[in-house]
Structure formats: C-alpha cells, structure tokens
Amino acid sequence: AEFGTSPKQYIMNKRISAACNFLETSDYSIKDISYMVGYENQLEFSQLFKKTVGKSPTAYRKNLVQTKRRN
C-alpha cells in the first residue's frame, strides 16, 4: 500500500526497470538479461517487457541504437 501497488507488481516493475538499464548500458543478450533480472523463461520475460514498456526488448534496444546514431 505504501508504494501504491501490489508487492508482485512492485517487484515486476523493479525487474523491468533493471532490464531497461541493462539494455541501455550493456551488450548482454536478451536471454542473459532475462535471467539477470529474475526470469528463467525468456519468452515470458519478453512478453511481460512488451506489455509493460510497449515494445519488445529487442525493439527497445534497437530504438536506443538508432536514437544514439541520430545524436
């Protein structure tokens, strides 16, 4: 209640935030990142990431690379 969300949702948000950080700052594979943030199933992680962020982890990283190239 203190964070305005359920414990499960809070943990998921923290994991997705950490995944975004890894996607932005590392060259780890999506599979490695999914394990690093606590998901053993890469497909489950990718689906949850897309549902939360609005794009797949691969698209998220690709968008970052394209944005950096423009700047």
Image (cartoon, helix red, strand yellow):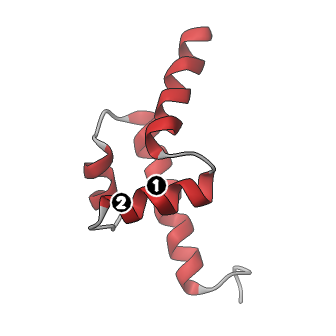
Q: Which of the 4 image quarters holds residue 35?
A: bottom left
Q: Amino acid at mark 2?
A: Leu
Q: Is residue 26 above or below residue 36?
A: above
Q: Cα distance, mark 1 to mark 2?
A: 17 Å
Q: Residue at x 29, y 66 (%)?
A: 41
The quadrant in which residue 52 appears is: bottom right
Residue drawn 40% across and 44% down?
Answer: 22
> Is residue 25 rendered to the left or right of residue 51?
left
Which of discs 1 and 2 lies nearer the camera? The answer is 2
Quick one: SS at disc 1? helix
Give coordinates of residue 62: x percent, y percent: 48, 28
Q: Secondary structure at mark 2?
A: helix
Q: Position of residue 19 (x, y in %)?
A: 44, 52
Asked if the residue under mark 2 is in contact with the one under mark 1, i.e. CB atoms within 8 Å, the reply is no
| Callout 1 crowding tier (Cα within 10 Å): few <14, some 14–19, many ≥20 | some
**Quadrant location, the C terminus:** top right
Q: Residue at x 69, y 79 (%)?
A: 3
57 left or right of 51 in image: left
Q: Residue at x 74, y 81 (%)?
A: 4
Percent position of residue 54, x then y? 63, 50
Q: Which mark is residue 34?
A: none
Give the mark nearer the N terminus: 1 vs 2: 1
Instruction: Looking at the picture, tell me which residue is in the foreground, 66 or 19.
Output: 66
Give the vertical position of 48 relative to 55 (above or below).
below
Q: Amino acid at mark 1?
A: Ala
Q: Quadrant of residue 10?
A: bottom right
The picture places residue 47, in percent across and down from the top left corner, at: 47, 60
Which residue lies under the disc numbered 2? Answer: 43
User: What residue is disc 1 on?
Assistant: 18
- Look at the image and tell me in which quarter the N terminus lies: bottom right
Image height check: is 53 above or below 64? below
